[in-house]
Image: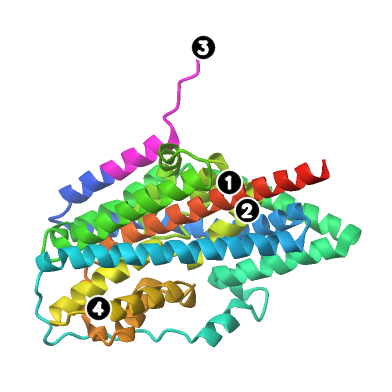
Amino acid sequence: MEKKKRIALPLQIFIGLALGIVAGLCLMGAPEIAVDYIKPFGTIFLNLIKFIVVPIVFFSIISGVISMKDIRKVGSIGVKTVIFYLCTTAFAIVIGLVLANVFKGVFPELAVSGLEYEAKEAPSIMDTIVAIFPSNIIEPFASATMLQVIVASLFFGFGIILAGEKGEAFGKFMESASEVSMKIMSFIIALSPIGVFALITPVVAENGPMILGSLAMVLLVAYIGYILHAVLVYSSTVKLMGGLSPIKFFQGMLPAMMMAFSSSSSVGALPLNIECSEKLGAKKDIAAFTLPLGATINMDGTAIYQGVCAIFIASCFGISLTLPQQLTIILTATLASIGTAGVPGAGMVMLAMVLQSVGLPVEGIALVAGVDRIFDMGRTTVNITGDAACAIIVSKMEEKKEARRAGRTG
């Protein structure tokens, strides 16, 4: 008997997303049904993703470091990754500001009297540096503090290399644990269509009418920015630096992008992003390092959101931002993307920093806070797509470097 052909996972996820949007629209009159009875299944799915993501990051990075067999190579990949993330974030904020200035005349003029918003205090640069290094081995895993997990895994990977023969048994255990974690991840990813449906339904049910309200134009400009950045920056970089067709790149990234859109979580989309990136040609060891780092510090979508919201809030307060002020926004948002790494609600903390840097009232955040989830869905999708582009590009650069080295020694 011929086996029944299974529907491909990307199509399953798309069907889940489409059905979730339809169900959400049907439940707009009674959003409590979606929140009370459908959202919990989405929460269970996200909990499962978060449960496996820390072991995957920890064991995968250690396995990657061991396979590189050279601490200097890890440093080289790290530098390339951070430079790529900073450059694309700067491009993103420029796109956001240009679009916001073009569409400024059609932004709604909202009343700003009686606004209140208490901004979380952003950590200082030194506090951020100190917070990268864990004080014990358990805390980073318990709190899923990704930068600390990455640092811990690098230290263990370096230790295994330096221990030589005595470290081999521990290294084999780590590689085995990485493989087991990947199998668990595959099982959880198979549940993605259900998870996506359960996550998107309550968002549409609760926010459907709000999207059509006064902030529709601001949301539209932000989403135009998200699409432009993905099409212009990622298409050109993966083609020129990664040797990959942009169409093939976006087709391959579709499952991870749909997961990011429905969950609004870079960490939640990480296992699927790793799988998609590797299928597109990213090396396993490089993807294991660049993607978790990107999920924490790479915020291209968030940077676009900063630019659009800063101009919108300024126009509501009757303030016109000068060119030097807009350059300050570019610099602040780029540095803040790393400075707020791992901070809960990093998008809002970054926006508060950006507004303060140009003397805009922080309480203006209250104007966009109501639809932040809708902004967040798009910016998370852009963020994880940028992470994958980086993994593919750095893999290609390392491939060329190894080929040149082989040519010289050959």
The amino acid type, in three-letter code, at marker 4 is Ile
Q: What stretch is highlighted in magenta?
A: 1-18
In the image, 291 versus 320, the foreground residue is 320
Residue 154, above or below 118: above
Residue labelled with disc 1? 282
Q: Which mark is residue 340?
A: none
User: Which mark is nearer the camera, 4 or 1?
Assistant: 1
Q: Which mark is residue 365?
A: 4
Determine the residue positioned at 27% across, 77% down.
323
Q: How far apart are marks 1 and 3 (CA)?
A: 37 Å
In the image, 280 versus 205, the foreground residue is 280
Going by the image, does 314 lie left or right of 327? left
Residue labelled with disc 3? 1
Magenta residue check for 27: no
Query: On the image, which quarter does residue 71 sit in?
Result: bottom right
Residue 73, above or below 122: above
Q: Do the residues labelled 1 and 2 touch (CB within 8 Å)?
A: yes
Placement of the C terminus among the 4 image quadrants: top right
Q: Distance between the residues labelled 4 and 3?
A: 61 Å
